[in-house]
Amino acid sequence: MPRKVHVQTTINGEEVEFLCEPRQSVLEILRDELGLTGAKEGCNNGNCGACNVILDGRLVNSCLVLSVEIDGKEVETIEGLADPGKLHPLQQEFLEHAALQCGICTPGFIMASKALLDENPNPTEHEIRYWLAGNLCRCTGYDKIIRAVLSTAEVMS
Protein backbone atom coordinates (compact mmCIF):
# COMPACT_ATOMS: atom_id res chain seq x y z
CA MET A 1 0.00 0.00 0.00
CA PRO A 2 1.47 3.38 -1.03
CA ARG A 3 2.42 5.80 1.68
CA LYS A 4 0.06 8.75 2.00
CA VAL A 5 1.31 12.31 1.58
CA HIS A 6 0.19 15.31 3.63
CA VAL A 7 -0.98 18.24 1.49
CA GLN A 8 -1.85 21.77 2.64
CA THR A 9 -3.56 23.99 0.12
CA THR A 10 -6.17 26.72 -0.24
CA ILE A 11 -9.42 25.76 -1.93
CA ASN A 12 -11.96 28.49 -2.61
CA GLY A 13 -10.24 30.76 -0.10
CA GLU A 14 -10.16 28.22 2.74
CA GLU A 15 -7.10 26.47 4.10
CA VAL A 16 -7.44 22.72 3.56
CA GLU A 17 -5.30 19.77 4.64
CA PHE A 18 -5.64 16.18 3.50
CA LEU A 19 -3.75 12.95 3.07
CA CYS A 20 -3.53 11.43 -0.39
CA GLU A 21 -1.75 8.75 -2.29
CA PRO A 22 0.92 10.20 -4.60
CA ARG A 23 -0.99 8.95 -7.69
CA GLN A 24 -4.36 10.54 -6.80
CA SER A 25 -5.52 13.37 -9.03
CA VAL A 26 -6.91 16.67 -7.82
CA LEU A 27 -10.26 15.60 -9.29
CA GLU A 28 -10.31 12.45 -7.15
CA ILE A 29 -9.46 14.39 -3.99
CA LEU A 30 -11.99 17.15 -4.68
CA ARG A 31 -14.83 14.73 -5.33
CA ASP A 32 -14.06 11.72 -3.15
CA GLU A 33 -12.26 13.19 -0.15
CA LEU A 34 -13.43 16.81 0.11
CA GLY A 35 -17.02 16.42 -1.15
CA LEU A 36 -16.61 19.11 -3.82
CA THR A 37 -18.46 17.38 -6.63
CA GLY A 38 -18.87 20.33 -9.00
CA ALA A 39 -15.91 19.31 -11.16
CA LYS A 40 -17.09 16.35 -13.20
CA GLU A 41 -15.20 13.31 -14.44
CA GLY A 42 -15.94 13.17 -18.14
CA CYS A 43 -12.97 11.58 -19.86
CA ASN A 44 -10.32 11.38 -17.11
CA ASN A 45 -7.61 12.08 -19.72
CA GLY A 46 -7.77 15.87 -20.21
CA ASN A 47 -9.83 15.95 -23.39
CA CYS A 48 -13.25 17.19 -22.26
CA GLY A 49 -12.75 20.04 -19.76
CA ALA A 50 -15.57 18.92 -17.45
CA CYS A 51 -13.16 18.90 -14.50
CA ASN A 52 -11.64 22.37 -15.04
CA VAL A 53 -10.44 24.27 -11.99
CA ILE A 54 -8.23 27.31 -11.63
CA LEU A 55 -4.86 26.55 -10.01
CA ASP A 56 -2.83 29.60 -8.98
CA GLY A 57 -4.69 31.66 -11.59
CA ARG A 58 -4.24 29.13 -14.39
CA LEU A 59 -6.96 26.94 -15.92
CA VAL A 60 -6.15 23.22 -15.54
CA ASN A 61 -7.84 19.88 -16.02
CA SER A 62 -8.02 18.58 -12.46
CA CYS A 63 -7.92 14.99 -13.73
CA LEU A 64 -4.37 15.60 -15.02
CA VAL A 65 -2.90 17.27 -11.93
CA LEU A 66 -1.67 15.14 -9.06
CA SER A 67 -2.92 16.23 -5.66
CA VAL A 68 0.62 16.35 -4.29
CA GLU A 69 1.30 19.12 -6.84
CA ILE A 70 -1.19 21.52 -5.22
CA ASP A 71 0.64 21.65 -1.89
CA GLY A 72 0.95 25.33 -0.95
CA LYS A 73 -1.11 26.47 -3.94
CA GLU A 74 -4.53 28.02 -4.44
CA VAL A 75 -7.38 26.18 -6.15
CA GLU A 76 -10.67 27.69 -7.30
CA THR A 77 -13.60 25.39 -8.04
CA ILE A 78 -17.15 26.01 -9.18
CA GLU A 79 -18.29 25.73 -5.55
CA GLY A 80 -16.33 28.86 -4.64
CA LEU A 81 -17.55 31.02 -7.51
CA ALA A 82 -20.82 32.41 -6.15
CA ASP A 83 -21.24 34.63 -3.13
CA PRO A 84 -23.68 33.38 -0.49
CA GLY A 85 -27.17 33.97 -1.85
CA LYS A 86 -25.97 35.45 -5.14
CA LEU A 87 -24.74 33.73 -8.29
CA HIS A 88 -21.55 34.82 -10.03
CA PRO A 89 -22.39 36.80 -13.21
CA LEU A 90 -21.21 33.85 -15.34
CA GLN A 91 -23.59 31.49 -13.57
CA GLN A 92 -26.43 33.99 -13.94
CA GLU A 93 -25.77 34.54 -17.64
CA PHE A 94 -25.52 30.79 -18.30
CA LEU A 95 -29.00 30.48 -16.77
CA GLU A 96 -30.45 33.47 -18.61
CA HIS A 97 -29.08 32.29 -21.97
CA ALA A 98 -30.10 28.65 -21.37
CA ALA A 99 -26.44 27.73 -21.92
CA LEU A 100 -26.78 24.37 -20.22
CA GLN A 101 -28.73 21.21 -20.59
CA CYS A 102 -27.60 18.05 -18.83
CA GLY A 103 -25.07 19.98 -16.70
CA ILE A 104 -22.09 17.61 -16.92
CA CYS A 105 -19.93 20.10 -18.83
CA THR A 106 -21.33 23.28 -17.27
CA PRO A 107 -18.95 23.66 -14.30
CA GLY A 108 -15.96 23.16 -16.60
CA PHE A 109 -17.26 25.70 -19.11
CA ILE A 110 -17.95 28.23 -16.36
CA MET A 111 -14.50 27.82 -14.81
CA ALA A 112 -12.84 28.07 -18.23
CA SER A 113 -14.90 31.17 -18.98
CA LYS A 114 -13.91 32.70 -15.64
CA ALA A 115 -10.24 32.08 -16.39
CA LEU A 116 -10.70 33.75 -19.78
CA LEU A 117 -12.49 36.79 -18.34
CA ASP A 118 -9.87 37.10 -15.59
CA GLU A 119 -7.21 37.30 -18.30
CA ASN A 120 -9.21 39.15 -20.96
CA PRO A 121 -12.28 40.99 -19.61
CA ASN A 122 -13.53 41.93 -23.08
CA PRO A 123 -12.96 38.97 -25.43
CA THR A 124 -14.28 38.71 -28.95
CA GLU A 125 -16.49 35.82 -30.02
CA HIS A 126 -13.52 34.31 -31.84
CA GLU A 127 -11.34 34.55 -28.71
CA ILE A 128 -14.05 32.89 -26.61
CA ARG A 129 -14.48 30.04 -29.09
CA TYR A 130 -10.70 29.53 -29.21
CA TRP A 131 -10.37 29.61 -25.39
CA LEU A 132 -13.24 27.17 -24.85
CA ALA A 133 -12.09 24.73 -27.55
CA GLY A 134 -10.84 22.37 -24.84
CA ASN A 135 -14.34 21.96 -23.41
CA LEU A 136 -16.74 19.48 -24.94
CA CYS A 137 -20.52 19.52 -24.77
CA ARG A 138 -22.83 16.94 -26.26
CA CYS A 139 -26.07 18.86 -25.68
CA THR A 140 -26.03 22.62 -26.24
CA GLY A 141 -24.38 23.24 -29.59
CA TYR A 142 -22.08 25.87 -28.01
CA ASP A 143 -23.74 29.03 -29.37
CA LYS A 144 -25.69 29.71 -26.18
CA ILE A 145 -22.51 29.22 -24.15
CA ILE A 146 -20.64 31.74 -26.31
CA ARG A 147 -23.53 34.22 -25.99
CA ALA A 148 -23.54 33.78 -22.21
CA VAL A 149 -19.81 34.54 -21.99
CA LEU A 150 -20.15 37.58 -24.26
CA SER A 151 -23.03 38.82 -22.14
CA THR A 152 -21.08 38.27 -18.93
CA ALA A 153 -18.21 40.35 -20.29
CA GLU A 154 -20.69 43.18 -20.93
CA VAL A 155 -22.30 42.84 -17.49
CA MET A 156 -18.96 42.79 -15.69
CA SER A 157 -17.46 45.76 -17.56
Image (cartoon, grey):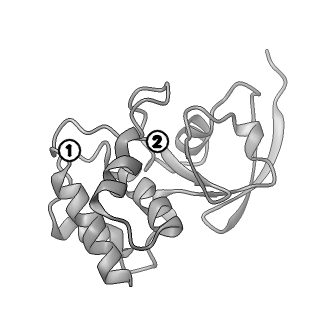
What number is the disc on residue 120? none
Q: Amino acid at mark 1?
A: Cys
Q: Is residue 111 left or right of residue 149?
A: right
| Near-viewer residue (157 or 112) | 157
Q: Is residue 81 left or right of residue 141?
A: right
x then y, percent, for residue 26: 62, 39
What residue lies at 30% left-to-right and 80% top-to-bottom? 154
Q: How many marks?
A: 2
| First in residue order: circle 2 vs circle 1 | 2
* Tag 2–tag 1 contact (CB < 8 Å): no
What residue lies at 81% left-to-right and 54% top-to-bottom? 72
Element class at badge 2: loop
Element class at badge 1: loop
Q: Name the residue carrying label 2.
A: 51
x then y, percent, for residue 62: 56, 40
Displayed quadrant of residue 148: bottom left
Residue located farthest toward the top when viewing the structure as drawn: 1
Residue 94 in sight from this viewpoint: no
Q: Amino acid at mark 2?
A: Cys
Vertical placement of residue 5 versus 87, above or below: above
For the N terminus, give its image quadrant.
top right
Displayed quadrant of residue 89: bottom left
Q: Name the residue carrying label 1.
A: 102
x then y, percent, for residue 58: 61, 54
| Near-viewer residue (133 or 137) | 133
What residue lies at 47% left-to-right and 68% top-to-bottom? 120
What residue lies at 38% left-to-right and 82% top-to-bottom? 156
State how far apart marks 2 and 1 are (Cα): 15 Å
x then y, percent, for residue 46: 49, 30
